[in-house]
Amino acid sequence: MSDDVVSATDPDWSRENVRSFWDPGPKLLRAIRRYQVAQTRGGLIGKLASKYWVLMHRFWSVMTQCEIHLHMPIAGGLRLPHPTGIVIHPESSIGPNSMIFQQVTLAGPCKIGGHVDIGAGAKIIGPVTIGDHAVIGANAVVTKDVNAYETVAGIPAKVISTRQPD
Ligand SMILES: CC(C)(COP(=O)(O)OP(=O)(O)OC[C@H]1O[C@@H](n2cnc3c(N)ncnc32)[C@H](O)[C@@H]1OP(=O)(O)O)[C@@H](O)C(=O)NCCC(=O)NCCS
């Protein structure tokens, strides 16, 4: 699942490219990105654009049954390969080039580092910090901080391996 070549600091925006008309993950993210741009732009155009992207966000949130807040700080390059049932606390933050699979919950403020992969069904109970290049196993329940390059799994999540930085 993880690829250490992926940067934890430089966002790879191509990971968010919309590839087809029906591409819920990138389209949900695009609504959030464009809304945030429209908010900073301000003025009448910014206001109208904000309203449009709020509608788009609502549409894709219903389609995916995801709750990812419009104001969330999400660094570029987030991948949502199967975007269903993802719930993210609005006080969480997500670093560059991370990946979140289906049915993941970030409960409470979770600081997710760069290039963190979060497996299907994982629950991360904040406040916690997940280090860069960490991997969270499917269905893990994470209640404590995870260091960079660690892979954790199980309930409660324990370290099952630690990779070496390149
Ligand atoms: C956590 C994960 C990354 C570990 O992969 P890995 O490094 O190749 O680890 P291994 O398969 O060698 O397993 C190592 C040990 O951890 C256990 N383990 C692996 N994943 C686990 C998980 N999610 N929950 C509990 N235990 C797990 C294995 O049973 C094994 O235990 P053992 O040493 O007692 O036999 C992977 O198992 C995982 O959960 N990936 C998420 C995949 C996913 O969600 N994909 C979405 C597709 S739609």
Image: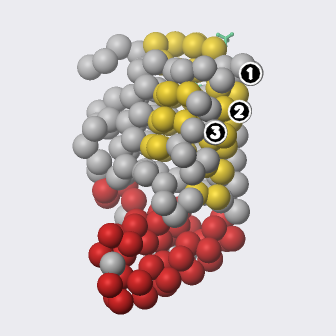
Q: Residue 136: where, in percent of width, then height?
A: 57, 29
| CA distance separating discs 1 and 2 | 8 Å
Residue shown at the point (36%, 44%) measured from the top left: 96
Q: Which of 15 and 78 is in front in this view?
A: 78
Q: At numbered mark 2, what does the secondary structure look like: helix, strand or loop?
A: loop
Q: Which of 157 and 47 is in front in this view?
A: 47
Q: At numbered mark 3, what does the secondary structure look like: helix, strand or loop?
A: loop
Residue at image mark 2: 139
Q: Residue 7: where, in percent of width, then height?
A: 29, 37
Q: What residue type is labelled 1?
A: Ile
| CA distance separating discs 3 and 2 | 17 Å
Residue shown at the point (66%, 40%) measured from the top left: 107
Judge whether residue 138 can be spotted in this image: no
Q: Earlier in the sequence, mark 1 or mark 2?
A: 2
How are the colours assigned in the image? Answer: secondary structure
Residue at image mark 1: 155
| CA distance separating discs 1 and 3 | 18 Å
Note whether 85 is above or below 4 in the view shown: below
Tags 1 and 2 touching, CB below 8 Å:
yes
Note whether 80 is above or below 133 in the view shown: below
Quarter-wise, where is residue 82 in the image?
bottom right
Q: Which of marks 3 and 2 is nearer the N terminus?
A: 3
Question: Does the Cβ of the disc 2 residue fall within 8 Å of ligand 1?
Answer: yes
Q: Which amino acid does label 2 sit on?
A: Asn
Q: Residue 114: where, in percent of width, then height?
A: 38, 36
Question: Does the Cβ of the disc 1 residue fall within 8 Å of ligand 1?
Answer: yes
Q: Is 9 on the left or on the right of 146, as rendered?
A: left
Q: How many labels does the image show?
A: 3
Which mark lies nearer to you, 3 or 2? 3
Please tell me the numbered disc located at residue 85: none
Quarter-wise, where is residue 127 in the image?
top right
Name the quarter where the C terminus is drawn. top left
